[in-house]
Image (cartoon, coloured by chain):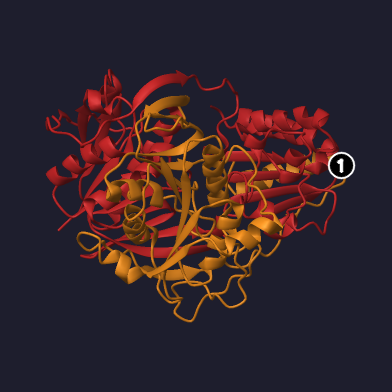
Chain colours: A red, B orange
Amino acid sequence: MSPTALVVADPRSPVGIRTTLEALGAARALLDRSGGGKVALALLGHGLGDVPEAAKRWGADQVLVLDDPRLAIFRSETYAWGAEGLVKRLAPPVVVLLPGSTMGRELVGRLSARLGGGGTSEALELELEETRGLRVRRPLFGGKASETLSLPFPAVASLRPNAFAPSEASAAAPVEAVELPKAGPAGPGAELLERSPVPVSDTPPLTQAPVVVSGGRGLRGPENWPLLEDLARALGAGLGASRAVVDAGWRPAAEQVGQTGASVSPQLYVAVGISGAIQHLVGMSSSRCIVAINTDPSAPIFKVADYGVVGDALVLLPPLTEAIRRARAGAGP
Amino acid sequence: MEAVVCIKPVPEADSRLRVAASGVTYDPEGVRYTLNSTYDEAALEEALRLKEAGAFEKVRVVSVGPPRAEEGLRYALAMGGDEGLLVETRPDDLLDPGFTAAVLAEAVRSLPHDLVLVGRRAGDDEAGVVGSALGEHLGIPSFAFVTGLTVSGGGSPLKVRRFTEAGEELLSVPPPVVISLLKGAQDPRTPTLPNILKARRKPLLREPWTEVLSRHPGAPVRAPAMRFELPPPRTGAHLVDYQSPAEAAEKLVKLLREEAKVL
């Protein structure tokens, strides 16, 4: 009995699309390891326009479209109700994989409660258990530990951004429009009063960026941040900061990485002039590869880093940015 | 209107974790606990400010946890909460977040709850699952990643500002609703000594979790932990050896491309 995977897409933003592709990649790899099975992609929303046309080449076997005014804004209630209807149409057992965007991370609790199966967030590894359910390994304490859970079918998991390879473009899959029942979730809904555009920034949002470059006191003052920003641009990285420099008012609180700030797990984390207080390590130690640049060879950051350069960040950054630019230019597009 | 805030004590960030004999969780021996998760204190601060602005008559605090969670509830009452409810577990009861949400829902249902506030996620499992699951069990709307909240009281709709990757949204939402705060707008207050003394006399009810759960329709599913693991100790960084900054840069880029394969 091969299981069916349902991925609920988040086509609302570039981050949503990237994490949706990661969920499709994870679904395909999961099913292929246990003898195959169908991957269905659910598109929920209203006025989806040409999204289904694009999404049919994202790597699913089937695209199910729920286009309904009740789904115009994302609400976990209506989206869980819509997704539940789709889960019931699929051949059991069903595994629902959700993107690591805010939508996926919010939906997982409600959808699993509604389906009456197991649910969890931030999945790092997935494995099917023959008849029982889905095994999920996920981080605890900011990556200081991990746990493996057994989620009974129908299992729902949202994925940690950057933990799974995105799916490859595919031949066009069949697209099916699905009608929602007239009777919807009880109770009045929410009304959207305004939507403010995403602030224009040439760096990706911190928690989902595949590369993060963070600066600390070793940069000696806010006037030296352009050096760090140049490095971030060369790497296409999100920009982070230690608590010390946020507390000192050098950088905005939104950039803080650590226990009271953002928790990140990029492919590459570059800590520049950061000593590595536990407060900071909790928020980044699950990154795949960590590079540290610091003048003090005994700084704790070198204990968690994979690669280190002992030296003055202000002297080391310009040639590093230059070398990365050259390497990337040589690597082609 | 009345508000309920859900709080949870979690291990301190610098706790040394060891695998418990069972292999499915950590050994509580030697772990120091915070009174409450940072995000939960931010949620409580938000509720207290709204109460002070006249939006709520009462703010109640609920925790599902072992007997020591009472300390966290007392602290919350010292911050300004009016009443506490401890849904008591035994130290060896392992409740996963989805299951906890079902228990919590029955506790919240027994209290007036025009607004239920939860922190963004707990500091230990970092799941962020409880908020919307609680909404589902209570049959009310829920919103997560909320960055701002305006409550005028008298049952009128709440103004909810939330983060999305496509831009910030401002929503009008009728109560009752579950709100999961991304981060508090202000630093949580520190209780004063008179308030700490006063908190000792505030009502704090205790109920065993099994009793609370018996009021839940149906049996919520459990997602048991099979394994708890610590990563292999990091061996320390490979330090790049160099004569000039340019050489350091070249060597580092080579390692990142050829060995780590991240460039």
**Quadrant location of residue A104?**
top left
Q: Quadrant of the N terminus of chain A?
A: bottom left
Residue holding disc 1: B244
Q: Residue at x 52, y 40 (%)?
A: B51
Quick check: B29 above or below A165?
Answer: below
Q: Position of residue B15 (x, y in %)?
A: 63, 67
Count the labels in the image. Answer: 1
Q: Residue at x 81, y 42 (%)?
A: A217
Q: Position of residue A242 (x, y in %)?
A: 71, 44
B2 on left or right of A173? right
**Quadrant location of residue B78?**
bottom right
Residue lying at the far bottom of the rendered structure: B21
- Which residue is more in the foreground, A313 or B255? A313
- Which residue is more in the foreground, B88 or A205? B88
**Quadrant location of residue A90?**
top left
Q: Position of residue B201 (x, y in %)?
A: 56, 64
Q: Position of residue B242 (x, y in %)?
A: 83, 48
Q: Residue at x 19, y 61 (%)?
A: B218
Please rate how many residues cluster around mark 1, counting C-alpha atoms within 10 Å: few if below 14, some from 14 to 19, many from 20. few
Q: Is residue A265 visible?
A: no
Quick check: B62 above or below A240?
Answer: below
Q: Is residue A172 visible?
A: yes
